[in-house]
Image: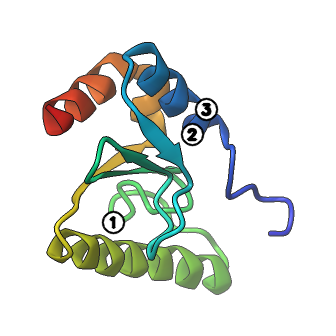
C-alpha cells in the first residue's frame, strides 16, 4: 500500500492535460474536504477514480480473494458516495471519471467537464 500513489497518477495527468488544452482554469489537489483531484472553474470538483480501488462494476466483477481487499474497496465505495453527496449539498458540481474512460475516451470526458463549467 505504501507504494500506491494518491497524487500525480497517470489518470490525473491525463485529466490535467485535457483541462490545460481546453483553457479551463483549475487547481490541482485543492485543500478541502473530500480531497478532490481538481477544482475546475469556480464550483466544479473533479475526481479521477482508479477502476480497482474505487470498485468499478464491483457487483459484476470477480471479487478479490482476500477479505482485507474486499473490505478496503467496499469502504472506498461507501466513502466516495458519502463525500460526493456532502460536496453536492455544499453547492458544488461533482464529476467523477473512471480510469478506463480517461484512458480510452478522453474526448467524452472533457466534453462532460465543459458542459458543467459553461
Lateral position of residue 68 relative to residue 58, left or right:
right
> Where does label 1 land, which residue?
59
**Marks 2/1: CA–CA distance:** 25 Å
Q: x and y percent of residue 44 in the render?
A: 27, 50
Nearer to me, 98 or 52? 98
Sequence order check, earlier mark of 1 and 3: 3
Give the image quarter of residue 9: top right
Residues at badges 1 and 3 in contact (C-beta under 8 Å)? Answer: no
Residues at badges 3 and 2 in contact (C-beta under 8 Å)? Answer: yes
Q: Locate the N terminus and report the quarter of the image it occupies.
A: bottom right
Sequence order check, earlier mark of 2 and 1: 2
> Where does label 3 land, which residue?
13
User: SS for tag 1?
Assistant: loop
> Where does label 2 land, which residue?
12
User: SS for tag 3?
Assistant: helix
> Can you say whether 30 is above or below 22 in the image?
below
Q: Locate the C terminus and report the quarter of the image it occupies.
A: top left
Nearer to me, 103 or 21? 21
Q: x and y percent of residue 50 in the render?
A: 53, 50
Question: Residue 36: which numbered mark, if any?
Answer: none
> Can you say whether 91 is above or below 20 in the image?
below
Q: Residues within 10 Å of mark 2 (few under 14, many from 20)?
A: many
**Marks 1/3: CA–CA distance:** 28 Å
User: SS for tag 2?
Assistant: helix
* Residue situated furthest right in the rendering: 3
Amino acid at each position: 500500500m505504501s507504494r500506491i500513489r494518491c497524487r500525480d497518477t497517470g489518470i490525473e495527468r491525463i485529466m490535467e492535460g485535457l483541462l490545460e488544452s481546453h483553457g479551463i482554469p483549475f487547481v490541482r489537489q485543492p485543500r478541502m474536504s473530500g480531497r478532490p483531484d481538481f477544482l475546475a472553474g469556480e464550483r466544479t470538483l473533479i475526481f479521477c477514480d482508479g477502476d480497482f480501488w474505487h470498485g468499478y462494476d464491483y457487483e459484476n466483477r470477480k471479487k478479490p480473494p482476500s477479505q482485507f481487499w474486499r473490505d478496503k474497496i467496499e469502504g472506498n465505495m461507501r466513502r466516495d458516495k458519502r463525500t460526493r453527496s456532502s460536496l453536492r449539498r455544499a453547492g458544488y458540481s461533482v464529476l467523477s471519471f473512471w480510469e478506463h474512460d480517461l484512458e480510452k475516451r478522453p474526448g467524452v470526458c472533457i466534453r462532460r467537464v465543459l458542459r458543467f463549467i459553461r
